[in-house]
C-alpha cells in the first residue's frame, strides 16, 4: 500500500471521527425532531466511513490513527461555548455547516497532498466529500 493511500485513509478516519464526536456533543442540545433524526443518520454514516477506512488500514497491516483527545476536548469546549447563549435550531445548523465545510477543506488538502492515492483510499475520500456536501444541503433548510 502506497504512503499516499495510508495518509488519505487516516485523514478519512480522523475526519469521520471528528464528525461523530461533534454530533455526539451537539445532539442532546437539538430539540427539533426531524433535525435530530437527520443527525442520527449522519452519525451512523460517519461511523460506517470511519470503520471502513480503519478496516482497510488494518487489512494492509497499517496502524490507524489513535483518537486525538486534545482535539476532541477542544471541539467539545467550542460547541459548549457556542451553544451556551444560543441553542436555536438555526444556530445548530449553522455550526454543523461550518464543521462540515472545515472537514471538506481538510479532506481536499489531504487529497492534494497525497495525489498518488487511488483505489479504496480515493473512493472513501470521495464518498466522505459527497456525504459532507449532502449534509450541508440538508442542513440549509434549518437555517
Image (cartoon, grey):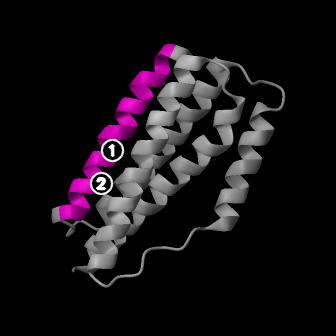
Circle 2 is placed at which residue position?
125
Q: Magenta segment, principal secondary structure? A: helix
Horizontal arrangement in the rendering, residue 135 relative to residue 95 (left or right): left
Q: Which mark is residue 105?
A: none
How far across and down, in percent of the image, does residue 85 sit?
84, 26
Tell me the residue at 23%/65% (across/down).
Answer: 115
Please indicate, yes or no, whether residue 2 appears anywhere in the rendered image. Answer: yes
Quarter of the figure with the N terminus: bottom left
Q: Is residue 134 magenta?
A: yes
Residue 52 picture location, percent across and down: 32, 60
Q: Distance between the residues labelled 2 and 1?
A: 6 Å
Most distant residue in the right direction: 85
Q: Is mark 1 on a helix, strand or loop?
A: helix
Across and down, in percent, residue 13 comes to: 42, 62
- Residue of label 1: 129
- Location of residue 125 with respect to 117 vertically, above or below: above
Residue 110 appears in the picture as rendered: no
Above or below for 132 versus 93: below
Q: Is 125 positioned to the left or the right of 63 in the image?
A: left
| Circles 2 and 1: CB atoms closer than 8 Å | yes
Quadrant assignment for the C terminus: top right
* Residue depicted at x 22% and y 79%: 2
Residue drawn at the location 35% of the way across and 82% of the way down: 62
The residue sitting at 58% across, 41% down in the picture is 23
Q: What stretch is highlighted in magenta?
A: 120-141
Amino acid at each position: 500500500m502506497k504512503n499516499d493511500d495510508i495518509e488519505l485513509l487516516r485523514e478519512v478516519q480522523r475526519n469521520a471521527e471528528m464528525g461523530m464526536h461533534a454530533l455526539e456533543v451537539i445532539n442532546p442540545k437539538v430539540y427539533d425532531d426531524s433535525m435530530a433524526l437527520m443527525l442520527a443518520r449522519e452519525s451512523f454514516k460517519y461511523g460506517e466511513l470511519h470503520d471502513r477506512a480503519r478496516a482497510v488500514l488494518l487489512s494492509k497491516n497499517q496502524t490507524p490513527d489513535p483518537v486525538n483527545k486534545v482535539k476532541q476536548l477542544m471541539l467539545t469546549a467550542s460547541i459548549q461555548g457556542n451553544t451556551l447563549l444560543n441553542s436555536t435550531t438555526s444556530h445548530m445548523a449553522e455550526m454543523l455547516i461550518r464543521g462540515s465545510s472545515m472537514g471538506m477543506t481538510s479532506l481536499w488538502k489531504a487529497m492534494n497532498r497525497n495525489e498518488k492515492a487511488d483505489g479504496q483510499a480515493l473512493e472513501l475520500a470521495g464518498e466522505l466529500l459527497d456525504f459532507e456536501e449532502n449534509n450541508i444541503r440538508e442542513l440549509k433548510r434549518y437555517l
